[in-house]
Amino acid sequence: MSSYQDPGFTIGIEEEYLLVDPETRNLADDPPATILEECRKRVGDQVTPEFLRSQIEVGTKVCHSIAEAKEELGGLRRCIRDVAESHGLAMIAASTHPIADWDLQKHTEKDRYNMLAQSMQTVARRLLICGMHVHVGIEDDDLRIDLMGQVSYFLPHLLALSTSAPFWRGRETGLKSYRMAVWNELPRTGLPPQFDSFGEYRRLVDTLVGTGVIEDATKLWWDVRPSDKFPTLEMRMTDICTRMEDAISIAAYYRCLLRMLWRLRRSNQRWRQYDRFMIAENRWRASRYGIDEGLIDFGKAEIVPFPDLHEELIELIREDAEFFDCVDEIESAHEIIERGTSAHKQVAVWKEAKKAGKDDAAALRDVVDMLIEETAHGL
């Protein structure tokens, strides 16, 4: 038996949204400060500014069930939608904006963001992207590091289910998640290194802090990382899902994957460690193709269609989904595969508008309208 304490497996979700002008369909690059003030009157510090002023971030409270997380996230999404509408704006949940130009955006005046803009220069100013982060409570430091190394294998699968960024500056990019291409320009992103212990991880952090490279571990922007603020393992790879039910499905998926890996560890087993180079290839495939072209199964040494991979994963984590009472949420990923992700819907709307004779600008406005509608779906 492991000497690790049993994890709490609490869950929390953070999402970043874009504020848009429903008339022009472009970003509200200078939204009134009263939006944030009114949101905070309603939900307190669960709403925060993001790097760009056209963005706004929410975070649920610590939740003990997927049902609780869904209720929390729904309330936060409704809050942002309603307050934005009261100011003549709209909210969209997508990892890139179909039309907006990054170099016209203003960054938020806040010490952390000012330092980021100064140190990263144009790389930071291009960060017109939004994501979803999922925290799962794993209190033991060494266990948190151990599971971080193992769960990295599955992160491309979650990215593929979440893609919502096919457009950039008015162009179809050919990628389902162009957000990842933008994010990759920053240092200290991508898959985390392999660590044998929490102490080894802390030595890396202490070296970077001691040399003045970073202020603290929050500047490690890996796809999954130990949170520097909470005893959680924070998954950061996924796009933000336009539909809330998709976000909940992926959050439940991640939580169940961690419990499955913990069960293996408790039985003195573990998921096979694969070279980060190999996992990064699936990361690219998920960004490029989403669920369309399959991912590499390294055990079989072949590309497997995503629906088949999904069925295998469902069976791996079914016991954990039953334990967490979230079988329905896990199986709703079937619906994502059947209808496509937000990226698929965006491209379909754009192509349909073009086929109907609309020019690029009008077709992209249709995409923004769809995103506004889909973001409000089920709220």
Image (tube, rainbow, N blue to C red):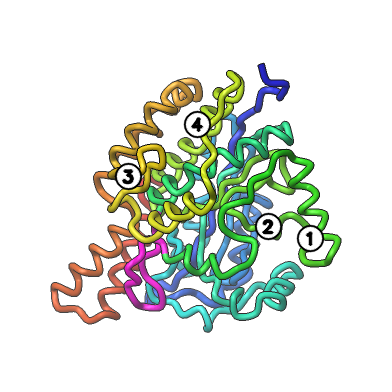
Badge 4 density bin: few <14, some 14–19, many ≥20, Cα 10 Å: many
N-term-proximal mark, 3 vs 1: 1
Residue 313 numbered tag: none
Please, is residue 266 above or below residue 244 in the view?
above
Q: Which residues are magenta?
A: 163-177
- The residue at which mark 3 appears reads as 302
Residue, x 44% and y 49% (percent of image)? Answer: 156
Taking 316 as reference, is 377 above or below it?
A: below
Q: Is residue 74 visible?
A: no
Residue 242, by quadrant, is bottom left
Tell me the distance, in whole angstroms, between the alpha carbons under discs 2 and 1. 10 Å
Residue linked to disc 4: 256
> What is the secondary structure assignment of the residue under circle 1?
helix
Specify the label residue 208 is tagged with: 1
Three-letter residue code for mark 3 = Glu
Q: Position of residue 261 (x, y in %)?
A: 54, 30
Pair 3/1: label in front: 3
Res 249 quadrant in image: top left
State yes or no: residue 2 in magenta.
no
Q: Secondary structure at mark 2?
A: loop
For the question of whether residue 156 can be seen, the reply is yes
Asked if labels 2 and 3 touch by Cβ distance under 8 angstroms, the answer is no
Magenta span: predominant SS is loop
For discs 2 and 1, the disc positioned in front in the rendered view: 1
The amino acid at mark 1 is: Leu
The mark found on residue 220 in the picture is: 2
Residue lying at the far front in this picture: please name it: 301
- Which one is in front in this view, the residue at disc 3 or the one at disc 2? 3
Question: Residue 310, image x and y in percent?
Answer: 34, 37
Residue farthest along the right direction in this orientation: 210
